[in-house]
Image: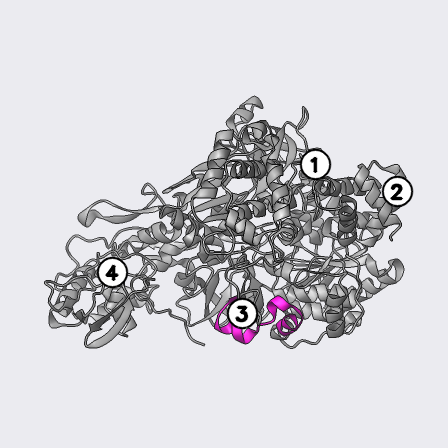
């Protein structure tokens, strides 16, 4: 799927979680993407991280998804 | 089977706890204080003759037929208006009252046609019955004097006649229009002998304010107001109680039948959602079920530009299975999926998601709730712990203030709107938050205290500014928050909303709502007593839809308006089974009962039940399916009951996705717009042709009962089973009740639900050991998640911006007479009220563009354009235009964009930047699309044998 569209969606998610004071924003963004995105969406998203503009916390979440603990 | 005739007690039940015992004709009877003698008598089994009284209306005391004698009292009081008293002794059939009644009846009949044998009400006429009850044997006055026997019949309404010659001016129709429906379209015109029922300003019913709800027809004791279908077909001979297949109110109806032919649909008085009321759709717009457009044979074709070939069910099902297997073998198990509709039953949607999970081996299942209330699921799940409205409909009777946000109840949920209007007439206050001036802002005997006509897309800002006022003016219900909510989260939220940037004054420029209106509305909601919030798709269908739902939940928790009657957060569900389709696990990330597929525990329940290993990863949501199709990774789709091409946003993108698929299976009543891109068509069954259940917006599970055999041979659940069996995963249910048994076995909130139970009475989930009688009100002592969770709701403006090219904001909605994509209602006489979609535009915006009322206009956004006629109205603010999406000729979703809710991908239907300009007629795209439709719907002639 279009990396730009997926990046846009991820940034939208990020804008919500960045404002939640008591949540680990990075973890919440990663968790939301894991729980609601089909694996091919996640795969396409993570495969093109270098080509898209991501908000800082979203990028951290993406990196975390790329290398799960 | 018999014709169900509910007992008419004559006057309304009273709810007083103090009881009164009296004697009626020597029989002791005990009733609540305030009960009429008429009702008490009926409860004792003694029917007092009556004409103007019926128990759905307030007592009127006009017809003088129900006179009785009371020992120790003078005269002969009307039993309908006389309340009982302790020790009272009533005589209902003394010589005196019998003589009086007969005399009054003689007068009525002296001005009534004596054509009983040829009258359409023959066998169902209260006047006829009452004449028999009073023993009328002659009419001494004859019929030669002045009379109304030549009064004309108004047949203008497509569904019922008004034969004035048969009217006894009992006012039941007028009172039903006022008290039950709340439209005030009827009146008694003239005085004395010249009195007559008149619609509007003495005009035909069709052009009056009448909304054709049918309440007047139901109330009429004669043949004066009569369904045209009864005139044509005769009186029904049996009835079956079932549930309406239109909106989320879920009205109970008696399908009144003659053989397997529906004669009329009559709202069932014992229906818990509607209490005997109806709207024009459920009451009258059922003719689509036998419309000639229905496709009754399965069809297949190799390519979408081929004509359809009619085939047997076996051939069609085999084609579906072989194509889906071929695609999975080529592109992987995740390359196919399903979409269900909220128009389908719980059992059907459960089976379709099971088909995806157990037979296809993936979680690519979604439902049309994706594009309406999926943010409700996310938002209420996060704050309260589950995705459901908190109240029953009856709760509105205890509300002191209602806040209606992004909903248009009189059009979208008309039967519940009548309940709301009734409560408002009793004195409850109303706040409307909507860009458009919906009817409830100001209509007869209803006027909103506040109308916050916000700029489309600014819901979160408005809700947060309301919260700002409540927090900074100390209007918080501190006890509720302390005892019922997470305090840390509350403190964070309170500090957030209290920031000066969230004050109504600071946000006024953003929202377009004057600050003093926001302050007034917030104070009213927080201090009026019981505050109830009702919201619709004007909340959810935004890029911040889920955030607004959470903001609404925050407001309700902060003011303690949760967990008792009269309060709550109530999503008004668009279609009949939105709640149910979501409950049944239709979303790609959740199994039934809103349990995420990643949970091993819940998966193991279904793995045990279904005997297969389940995929722990979420599947594709509807918009993602189209994207994946264009990418070439999603190639097969089974769509049950939903017209995604017409209903989903950005039509060009949807058609591109459908075109890219190798096998699209449409399972529907008609060759809908999606079927233009289908390879297999499976004929569906209407709600009249199958058994099952619908769950309405108050979580009420209602029975749907088959009243005729499926016209195409299979009920929809049988078709899904056939596909599954052909795919190699066996399903062998004998009846939908067995599917419900499986649902109850596996879903804790449905554990106590059985068909045997539902046959006795509908029930609201959760229904289980903890809530054996169901749950009319949720979160009573604690939230489903334990403590209520406040969420910070930062306003993020949508990226859909107006600018020089597209300077207006389009918002979309629906109207009373049409339903969703119009597939059903366009195939009924309802088209008389809405033959085409139109564009509402403010007179100033129209003048700026040289547009006059009724002109063709071109409506364009950055993704597409269409043409339709303009209607100039101040219902919309300058800068805002509005249309509906009921007609495929217009295809309003050609205009709407790909923007969607951040959490759920629910499309942002409610905000599209557009331009409007004069036009000469339909656009080139519309012409091309009409050609495509004609070509796509060709059915090849069956070769001669």
Reading the image, the residue beneath label 4 is: B113
> Where does residue B238 sit, x and y in percent of width and height?
44, 72
Whichever of labels 3 and 1 marks the residue nearer the N terminus, that label is 3
Q: Which class describes the residues within 10 Å of circle 3: few (<14), some (14-19), or many (20+)?
A: some
What is the secondary structure assignment of the residue under circle 4? Answer: loop
Name the one closer to the observer, B748 or B589: B748
Name the one closer to the observer, B357 or B515: B515
Reading the image, the residue beneath label 2 is: A48
Q: Which class describes the residues within 10 Å of circle 4: few (<14), some (14-19), or many (20+)?
A: some
Q: Residue at x 67, y 23 (%)?
A: B804
Q: Which class describes the residues within 10 Å of circle 1: few (<14), some (14-19), or many (20+)?
A: some
Labelled pair 4, 1 in contact (Cβ < 8 Å): no
What is the secondary structure assignment of the residue under circle 1? Answer: loop
Give the chain of mark 3: B
Q: Nearer the viewer, mark 3 or mark 1?
A: 3
What is the secondary structure assignment of the residue under circle 3? Answer: loop
Q: Which residues are magenta?
A: B740-763
> Where does residue B546 sit, x and y in percent of width and height?
65, 46
Q: Nearer the viewer, mark 4 or mark 1?
A: 1
Same-chain status of marks 4 and 2: no
Labelled pair 2, 1 in contact (Cβ < 8 Å): no
What is the secondary structure assignment of the residue under circle 2? Answer: loop
Give the chain of mark 4: B
Name the colour scheme: one colour
How many angstroms separate mark 3 from mark 4 (CA)? 39 Å
Magenta segment, prevailing SS (helix, strand or loop): helix
């Amino acid at each position: 799927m279009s990396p730009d569209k997926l990046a846009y969606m991820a940034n939208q998610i990020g804008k919500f979680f960045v404002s939640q004071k008591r949540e680990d924003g990075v973890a919440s963004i990663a968790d939301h993407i894991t729980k609601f995105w089909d694996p091919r969406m996640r795969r396409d998203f993570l495969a093109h991280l270098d080509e898209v503009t991501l908000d800082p916390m979203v990028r951290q979440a993406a990196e975390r998804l790329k290398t799960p603990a | 089977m018999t014709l169900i005739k509910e007992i008419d007690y004559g006057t309304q039940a009273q709810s007083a706890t103090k009881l009164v015992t009296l004697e009626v004709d020597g029989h002791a009877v005990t009733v609540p204080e305030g009960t009429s003698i008429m009702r008490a008598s009926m409860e004792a089994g003694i029917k007092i003759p009556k004409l103007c009284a019926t128990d759905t209306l307030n007592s009127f005391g006009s017809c003088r037929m129900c006179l009785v004698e009371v020992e120790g009292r003078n005269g002969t009081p009307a039993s309908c208006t006389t309340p009982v008293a302790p020790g009272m002794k009533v005589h209902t059939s003394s010589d005196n009252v019998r003589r009086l009644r007969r005399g009054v009846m003689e007068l009525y009949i002296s001005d009534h046609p004596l054509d009983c044998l040829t009258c359409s009400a023959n066998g169902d006429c209260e006047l006829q019955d009452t004449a028999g009850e009073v023993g009328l044997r002659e009419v001494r006055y004859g019929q030669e004097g002045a009379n109304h026997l030549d009064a004309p019949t108004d047949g203008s309404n497509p569904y019922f006649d008004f034969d004035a010659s048969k009217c006894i001016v009992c006012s039941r129709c007028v009172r039903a229009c006022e008290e039950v429906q709340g439209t005030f379209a009827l009146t008694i015109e003239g005085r004395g002998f010249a009195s007559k029922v008149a619609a509007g300003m003495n005009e035909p019913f069709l052009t009056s304010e009448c909304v054709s709800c049918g309440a007047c027809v139901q109330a009429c004791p004669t043949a004066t107001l009569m369904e045209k279908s009864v005139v044509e077909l005769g009186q029904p001979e049996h009835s079956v109680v079932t549930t309406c297949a239109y909106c989320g109110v879920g009205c109970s109806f008696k399908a009144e039948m003659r053989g397997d032919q529906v004669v009329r649909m009559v709202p069932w008085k014992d229906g818990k959602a509607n209490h005997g009321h109806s709207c024009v759709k459920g009451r009258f717009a059922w003719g689509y079920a036998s419309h000639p457009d229905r496709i009754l044979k399965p069809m297949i074709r190799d390519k979408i530009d081929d004509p359809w070939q009619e085939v047997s069910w076996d051939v069609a099902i085999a084609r579906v299975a072989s194509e889906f297997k071929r695609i999975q073998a080529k592109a992987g198990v995740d390359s196919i999926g399903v979409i269900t509709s909220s128009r389908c039953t719980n059992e059907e949607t459960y089976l379709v998601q099971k088909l995806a999970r157990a037979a296809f081996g993936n979680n690519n299942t979604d439902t049309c709730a994706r594009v309406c209330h999926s943010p409700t699921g996310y938002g209420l799940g996060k704050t309260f712990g589950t995705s459901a409205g908190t109240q029953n409909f009856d709760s509105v009777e205890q509300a002191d203030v209602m806040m209606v946000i992004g909903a248009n109840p009189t059009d979208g949920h008309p039967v519940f709107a009548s309940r709301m209007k009734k409560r408002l007439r009793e004195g409850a206050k109303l706040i409307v938050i909507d860009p458009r001036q919906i009817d409830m802002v100001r209509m007869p005997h209803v006027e909103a205290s506040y109308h916050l006509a916000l700029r489309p897309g600014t819901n979160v800002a408005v809700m947060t500014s309301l919260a700002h006022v409540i927090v900074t003016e100390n209007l918080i219900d501190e006890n509720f928050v302390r005892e019922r909510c997470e305090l840390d989260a509350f403190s964070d939220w309170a500090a957030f909303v209290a920031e000066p940037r969230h004050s109504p004054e600071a946000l006024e420029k953003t929202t377009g709502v004057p600050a003093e209106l926001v302050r007034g509305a917030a104070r009213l909601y927080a201090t009026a007593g019981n505050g109830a919030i009702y919201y619709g798709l004007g909340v959810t269908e935004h890029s911040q839809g889920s955030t607004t739902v959470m903001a609404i939940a925050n407001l309700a928790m902060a003011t303690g308006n949760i967990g008792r009657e009269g309060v709550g957060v109530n999503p008004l569900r668009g279609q009949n089974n939105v709640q149910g389709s979501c409950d049944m696990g239709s979303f790609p990330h959740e199994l039934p009962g809103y349990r995420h597929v990643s949970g091993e525990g819940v998966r193991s329940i279904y793995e045990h039940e279904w005997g297969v290993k389940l995929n722990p990863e979420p599947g594709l949501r509807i918009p993602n399916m189209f994207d994946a199709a264009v990418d070439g990774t999603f190639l097969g789709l089974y769509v049950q009951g939903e017209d995604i091409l017409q209903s989903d946003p950005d039509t060009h993108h949807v058609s591109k996705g459908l075109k890219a698929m190798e096998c699209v299976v449409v399972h529907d009543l008609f060759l809908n717009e999606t079927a233009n891109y289908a390879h297999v068509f499976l004929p569906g069954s209407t709600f009249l042709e199958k058994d099952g259940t619908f769950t309405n917006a108050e979580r009420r599970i209602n029975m749907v009962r088959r009243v005729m055999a499926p016209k195409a041979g299979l009920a929809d659940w049988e078709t899904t089973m056939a596909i599954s069996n052909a795919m190699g995963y066996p399903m062998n249910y004998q009846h939908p009740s067995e599917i419900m048994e499986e649902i109850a076995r596996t879903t804790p909130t449905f554990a106590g639900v059985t068909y045997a139970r539902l046959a006795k009475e509908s029930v609201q989930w959760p229904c289980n050991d903890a809530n054996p009688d169901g749950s009319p009100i949720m979160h009573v002592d604690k939230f489903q998640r334990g403590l209520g969770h406040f969420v910070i709701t930062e306003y993020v403006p949508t990226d859909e911006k107006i600018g020089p090219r597209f300077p207006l904001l389009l918002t979309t909605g629906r109207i009373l007479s049409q339903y969703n994509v119009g597939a059903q209602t366009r195939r009924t006489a309802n088209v008389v009220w809405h033959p085409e979609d139109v564009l509402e535009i403010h007179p100033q915006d129209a003048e700026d563009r040289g547009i006059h009322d009724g002109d063709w206009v071109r409506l364009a956004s950055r993704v597409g354009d269409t043409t339709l006629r303009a209607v100039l109205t101040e219902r919309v603010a300058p800068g805002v235009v509005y249309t509906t999406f009921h007609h495929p000729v217009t295809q309003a979703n050609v205009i709407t964009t790909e923007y969607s809710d951040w959490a759920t991908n629910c499309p942002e239907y409610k905000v599209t930047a557009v331009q409007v300009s004069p036009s000469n007629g339909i656009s080139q795209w519309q012409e091309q699309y009409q050609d495509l439709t004609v070509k796509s719907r060709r059915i090849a002639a069956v070769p001669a044998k």
